Image (spheres, rainbow, N blue to C red):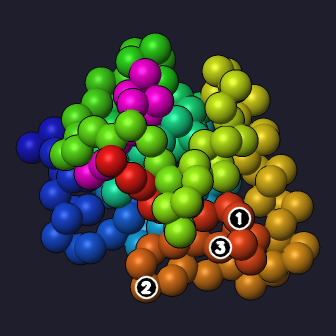
Amino acid sequence: MDDLDASKQRLRTRNLSLVFVKNSKVIFETDRGGLLGFLEAISELRDDLAEASVADRIIGKAAALLCAYSRVKAAFAVTLSDGGLSVLRDNHIPCEYGELVPSIHNLERTDQCPFEKLVENVNTPKEAYQMITLACKRQSHTAPELHAAENHTINCDASDLKDDHYSS
């Protein structure tokens, strides 16, 4: 079994939100939804994410830019947005997905996901990483207790930065 298949299997069988596998070993996994799990992996593992395979519940443009920033070798998303697919292709990251959707929406499904809005006009992975990290740091001052809700939504601020919801 290759690393991408291993990450997909672990994501599904353990009901996780994010799994990185490298050289047949799980190097990071979490049930935290949204982008905070991805940011945690980057913070903890940095260059060790390079050449790993990642399986994520939802990959929009923001998460795809983090994939490119991390230099993963392959990605799987249960749900992938058109923007995420474009970023992965532009960065030569092979990807598989269960469902392709036009966009990722906020928790209420009334608007585009705030992270997707944040990176809407960003095309470089480094700039996206810096913007996402800064947005979360700013919001952690007003909502210091980041937590995962049962629906795998991470509250990066009390109302806006939720990145685990999509709409077809």
Q: Residues within 10 Å of mark 1 (few under 14, many from 20)?
A: some
Q: Find disc 2 in the rendering and name its residue.
A: 150
Q: Residue at x 71, y 64 (%)?
A: 160
Dots 3 and 1: beta carbons under 8 Å?
no
Q: Residue at x 16, y 58 (%)?
A: 9
Image quarter in which the N terminus is found: top left
Q: Residue at x 39, y 53 (%)?
A: 167
Q: Relative to residue 109, is residue 72 depicted above or below?
A: above
Q: Whole-percent x and y of residue 39?
A: 62, 54
**Judging from the image, what secondary structure is the residue with disc 2 in?**
loop
**Mark 1 residue type:** Asp
CA gap between label 3 and label 2 equals 12 Å
**Judging from the image, what secondary structure is the residue with disc 3 in?**
loop
Along the viewing direction, whichever of 102 and 47 lies nearer the viewer: 102
Q: Residues within 10 Å of mark 2 (few under 14, many from 20)?
A: few
**Mark 3 residue type:** Asn
Magenta stretch contains residue 119: no
Residue 36: which quarter of the image?
A: bottom right
Q: Relative to residue 127, is residue 47 depicted above or below?
A: below
Q: Find disc 3 in the rendering and name its residue.
A: 155
Q: Residue at x 23, y 74 (%)?
A: 14
Say whether disc 3 or disc 1 marks the residue closer to the N-terminus: 3
Start-end of magenta stretch = 78-86
Q: Find disc 1 in the rendering and name its residue.
A: 160
